[in-house]
Amino acid sequence: MTSALIDSLRKGNRLALSRILSQVENGTDAGIAALEELFLETGTAHKIGITGPPGSGKSTLVNALTRELRRREPEKKVAIIAVDPSSPFTGGAILGDRVRMLDLQDDKQIFIRSMASRGALGGLAEQTEALSQVFDAAGYGFILIETVGAGQSEVDVVNLAHTTIVVDAPGMGDDIQSIKAGILEIADILVVNKADRPGADQSVSYLKNMVEMGYARSINNRNHHLEDFHENPVEATPSADWIPPVLKTVASEYQGITELTNAILTHAAHLRQSGQWHAKDQAAIRTNINHQLIAGLLKDFHQNVPAELVDSLVEKAQKRAISPNAAVRDLLAYNRNNTVESSE
Ligand SMILES: Nc1nc2c(ncn2[C@@H]2O[C@H](COP(=O)(O)OP(=O)(O)O)[C@@H](O)[C@H]2O)c(=O)[nH]1
Ligand SMILES: [Mg+2]
């Protein structure tokens, strides 16, 4: 049954796609099986993360960008994943998003999916990555991921993207302070949206300064590691050879969208030429495997080691009779000596 569903997805059936996305999101057996099969057909989509403070205009920008990407590369389908962990609405999207996204709904080569839950696949990043893989296998050439730039989980989400766009707007509270330093560092493209508002030019120069400072820093780091840079060009090439452009947009008026699209497509070409596309893909896969490995090892561990033993060592450590470090050593030794042999 699932296999028929997967075939429908391959043929472009939107209902099948929607059902598989739900299965994957809910972590059902069918969803996990589908993902295993579909992963082998992934690797072509350009994943683009859009992050920034609430109200900076991310959804409006995604809307405009989607239209422009469809116009520029009509053979490519566009998927939008709206990640909003704080949204109380089932399905994630706030009403404003839904309304604005309406003008995209006539185009059957565009698919919008909201995600509010952390779901069965662990963190938000894992969940987003799993949905991206389904879209990728379903032949979506661009996957736009909108997330509120609030914390580590959002950084994790956009780290899985090939291109990260950080959006800010002038006059938002303490202005640029609203962008967290950690978020700035992961930006491939910076956008000052709402450029129709006063203060846009100051925001642009501030961000340009930040970029220059960051660029100088990474150049220093690169010289520091010149040896491994030579030994392993792909792994060690920092993105220092890409200077994040700072662009102005008025998303609600479709202004600056052509330039932003140019920057996105140029960044993709840069990633491919420099070998970083390959490196990013590999890093994302490694992260994915590591996460699953940790979960699997822990599960094995708890099957091998009685909970009472763990409890008794916790108590000993609490009495300061042993250190946590010694407790772990004992537990790992027990696990090693009592591992149930897998039948070959
Ligand atoms: N003046 C102005 N308003 C904008 C612009 N872009 C978006 N908006 C408005 O800003 C509000 C928040 O936009 P939204 O896309 O929902 O922001 P998000 O929370 O970052 O997704 C909405 O009322 C938009 O219509 C812009 O370039 N200029
Ligand atoms: Mg939004």
Image (cartoon, rainbow, N blue to C red):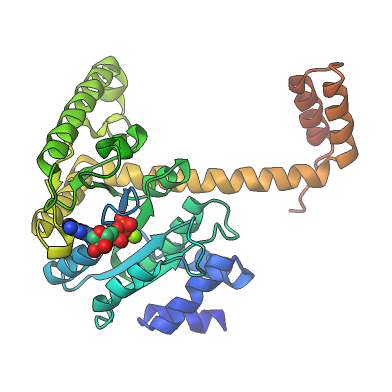
Q: How many marks?
A: 0
Left or right: residue 228 versus residue 252 is right
User: 183 or 219, which lies in front?
Assistant: 183
Left or right: residue 140 versus residue 215 is right
Where does residue 259 sit, x and y in percent of width and height?
A: 9, 54
The quadrant of the rendered image in which ligand 2 is seen is bottom left
Q: Quadrant of residue 227?
A: top left
User: 237 or 328, which lies in front?
Assistant: 328
Please tell me whether residue 321 is drawn above or below residue 99 in the rendered image.
Answer: above
Where does residue 255 sit, x and y in percent of width and height?
A: 9, 59
Q: Quadrant of residue 256?
A: bottom left
Where does residue 287 sit, x and y in percent of width and height?
A: 48, 44
Tell me, yes or no, if residue 340 can be seen here. no
User: 161 or 258, which lies in front?
Assistant: 258
Tell me, yes or no, if residue 204 can be seen here. yes
User: 262 or 205, which lies in front?
Assistant: 205
Please tell me whether residue 7 is drawn above or below residue 320 in the rendered image.
Answer: below
Q: Residue at x 38, y 51 (%)?
A: 148
Please tell me whether residue 70 is drawn above or below residue 317 in the rendered image.
Answer: below
Q: Residue at x 59, y 73 (%)?
A: 30
Q: Residue at x 87, y 16 (%)?
A: 321
Quadrant location of the N terminus? bottom right
Q: Residue at x 32, y 71 (%)?
A: 139
Where does residue 26 sit, x and y in percent of width and height?
A: 58, 67
